[in-house]
Image (cartoon, grey):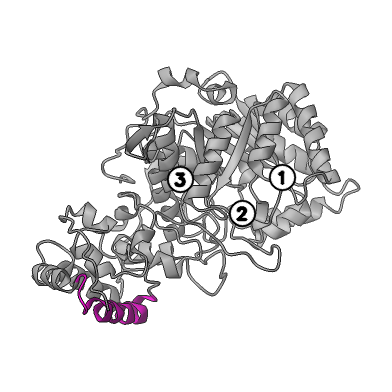
Amino acid sequence: MNLFPEAGLKMEESQVDPTKVAQFGRYQFSLHDANTFSVTWELVPGRGAFEKAQQEMIDAAAKAVSSGRIHALTITDNPGGNPAISAEILGAEIRRLGMEPLVHLTCKDKNRNQLESMLYGLQRAEVRNLLVMSGDYPKDGYGGAPKPVFDLDPITLLGLISELNKGMEVPKPGGKTTLKSARFFTGVAASPFKALEAEQMGQYYKLRKKLTAGAKFVVSQVGFDARKMHELLQVVRLLGFGNIPVVGNVYVLPLGAAKLMNSNGLPGCVVADKLLRNIQAEAAGPDKGRAKRLERAAKMYALLKGMGYAGAHISGHGMTVPDLLEVIEHGEELSHRWPDFVHEFDYSQENGWYFFERDEKSGLNTMTPVSRGVHSSAGMGYSAMRMIHHLAFTREGVLFGPMRALARMVDGSALESAYTKCEQIIKGLTNDCRHCGDCAMLDLAYLCPMSKCPKNQRNGPCGGSFEGWCESYPSQRKCIYVLAYERLKAHGADQSLGEDLVPPVNYDLHETSSWINFYLGRDHSAQKLKIEPVARKKKPKK
């Protein structure tokens, strides 16, 4: 069984051209060097510009640079959704220390124009390495909770960066001009540590979109299950991106962080109940578990290196440079024994789902995908929506022609306001429509990502869901992509979640009729069907 029919099982295929890798800096090149196991260390900034914590972070960065044992320092962007000193400014400081920075670039706080502006600044500062992510849902800020943005998602942001790397064509008075090419080296995060089939498959379908959109490397989310670590490597190869470097996340896990992750207090980071019990027992020791957690991290480093990961992304609250060096050095010493440690990372979630069958000999995975079972019923409501879609929103549907003719007649007339209000009422009752005018329900099993996903993800789930529940509404609201997968799977169509890239909302269409926009060729769904566009008529003056 293939994850995607067009990808196949050709493990050696890749869309990376190794001859072009050398144009980038030291960190990027090391990821493609089979003789180098790249190591990054994550720095977590906080609030304030000149506080003690910020200076301690820069001092630690300088010591890490002088150690000569790491290839890049990574900087989180408003960690946990809280305000912090900007990652791009710290990236420029890290570069001045003589080290390649890897800046986290998230979509949660900035619209597309601000992201583009930031990229120009990063380009000018020669900060080239970016880890592109959705970002944690914003938390408390000045005066209360901030308004989340999520204008672009990681896939569309990768598209913007790819355009900048090629030399983006932009308008100017009297014509167009082409900007000087950037040299950004972009990676993405991916989580293999989801408990449910629907949840995990959503992650893999989105990963395919990220790689297709131009991601040059992948960093795993935090998790401690060896089979899942192995699974991510296999899936990247299964998708036909075998030469894309995959970096494993090595988190030095104290008890406090373990408790948070076990309850999804740090969304997307997974600590199974069994691991939490082990850490609780270790924390009762005289060193509060320090030696055990550093040893666990070193074994995980060795495990990743032995499996075939391109590097290790080391992180952990309260880590010092001596801790970092101990993990690296001990991990290197243990790396030749990595198969011995597989059983120590048998931290599956309760009833957790795996993409591949278990290899009883190694404790990892075979190359045989598990059966994903029979397609269950998706419900009468979804079946009715599919029928309506076929009748009215496909070229061969019997209602397509009359609806297009009606849209032409109503467009720009005195009837348009009433027509739009009628549409808004119908879609509001059935889909909680937010009237964006550039509808994505046709892409997502007739579910609205603008109203039902707090992060407005139009190309796949974020990484923060837990046991199928939305990050922002745990135990209250199912992740919209879990629902979409279940609907689509019932009709054998779940692979559509990994296919067409959905563009960001075109706000020129905001609060206009999405039906008129579709039938008159103005929105992204109409463009996909090659519906001939009709210029918008001016409304008559009152």
Residue nearer the viewer, 481 or 120: 120
- The residue under the point 51% across, 37% down is 187
- In this orientation, does residue 415 appear? yes
Find numbered disc 1 in the image and state the secondary structure of the residue it sits on: loop
Q: Is residue 157 magenta?
A: no
Name the residue tied to disc 3.
157
Few, some or many C-alpha atoms within 10 Å of disc 2 (few <14, some 14-19, many ≥20)?
Answer: many
Residue plotted at (29% across, 38% down): 8
Mark 2 vs mark 1: which is more N-terminal? 1
Q: Considering only order in the chain, which callout, 3 or 2, is on the residue closer to the N terminus?
A: 3
Magenta span:
411-432
Cα gap from disc 2 to disc 1, whole angstroms: 19 Å
Tell me the CA gap for discs 3 and 1. Answer: 23 Å
Q: What residue occupies the far right of the structure in this picture?
A: 286
Residue at the spot of label 2: 270
Q: Is residue 418 magenta?
A: yes
Quarter containing the C terminus: bottom left
Q: Considering depth in this image, is 197 or 137 the residue closer to the camera?
A: 137
Q: Amino acid at mark 2?
A: Val
Residue drawn at (47%, 65%) of the image: 453
Q: Looking at the picture, which amino acid does disc 3 mark? A: Leu
Q: Is residue 371 left or right of residue 35?
A: left
Q: Earlier in the sequence, mark 3 or mark 1?
A: 1
Q: Which mark is residue 44?
A: 1
Q: Amino acid at mark 1?
A: Val
The percent position of residue 392, horizontal first and vertical second, equals 16, 70
